[in-house]
Image (tube, helix red, strand yellow):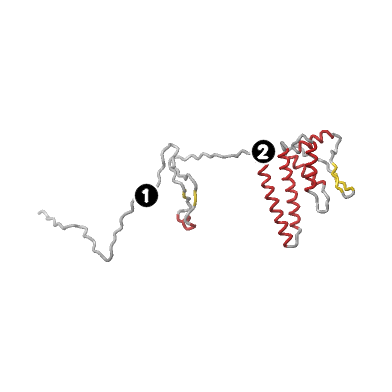
Amino acid sequence: MPPRLDIGTQIKMENGVTQIIEGPRHSDLDGWRAQLMAAFGTTSETVAHVEVERIAKALRQRDGTINPAELDTVIAIVSGQQPKNELEAMTICQMAVAHALTMRSLGNLNRSNEIEQQDSNALTVARLTKAFTLQVDALAKLRRGGEQRVVVEHVHIYAGAQAIVGAVTHTGGPRALIENQGQPHATTAIPIVASDGQEMRSQNADRETVPVSSGEGPQALPYARRGTRIRGTKR
């Protein structure tokens, strides 16, 4: 795993103004600048510094302080994803900041005593986690160029086997599932073809119903034998 960028942030307060001091912990300033620009997928040093300031403002506490370790962590996460351009870098920055704010909101939720505070913090956590999921999907689409991936599976049906082709649903309620042993029913009438190309057996086509005798009152049944015949015996 390649090492992440260590921006070495220092925060100073002068006359009520927060100053973010960036710089390497070593003497290779040019190498540090190249790593900083690569971390944000850009060749512009200005873009990299502006993004660092935006991340710092997003992580600012209520009292105006900024945790340098938290800022360095977010930038290290962005660097670890190795964005290929500025658009990917912006998306990854949003993901990293959303994660940091989610963990902070979870801490606020854990420390909440009032029901209103718990509901507010829980709602914030839910929104941030949803936004994080959407950002992950957006980054995945960017990296695959917006193309959709379709998986095609081939199913081989051999002679004597059974299969269902088409959408499958269960009908008739729980009792029907018990009576038919939980077997599903296909909603489309598509013939099933075995591997040798022959259509497999299916149910018989619908035929005319057998006529039912009608009438009221008891009726005598006809005698099965039309007549009697006495056979003689030979002596």
User: Residue 214 at what x, y percent from top left?
Assistant: 29, 61
SS label for mark 2: helix
Task: Answer few, some or many: residues within 10 Å of disc 1's Cα (few below 14, many 20 plus, some between 14 and 19).
Answer: few
Q: Is residue 28 above or below residue 225?
A: above
Q: Is residue 210 above or below residue 74?
A: below
Residue drawn at (83%, 51%) of the image: 64
User: Residue 231 at what x, y percent from top left?
Assistant: 13, 55
Disc marking residue 143: 2
Q: Are marks 2 and 1 in contact (CB under 8 Å)?
A: no
For residue 29, side relative to residue 186 (left or right): right
User: Residue 223 at what x, y percent from top left?
Assistant: 21, 60
Residue drawn at (45%, 37%) of the image: 195
Q: Which residue in the protein does label 1 denote?
A: 206
Q: Residue furthest right?
A: 15
Residue drawn at (78%, 39%) of the image: 48
Camera-nearest residue between 118 and 5: 118
Q: CA distance from mark 2 to mark 1?
A: 54 Å
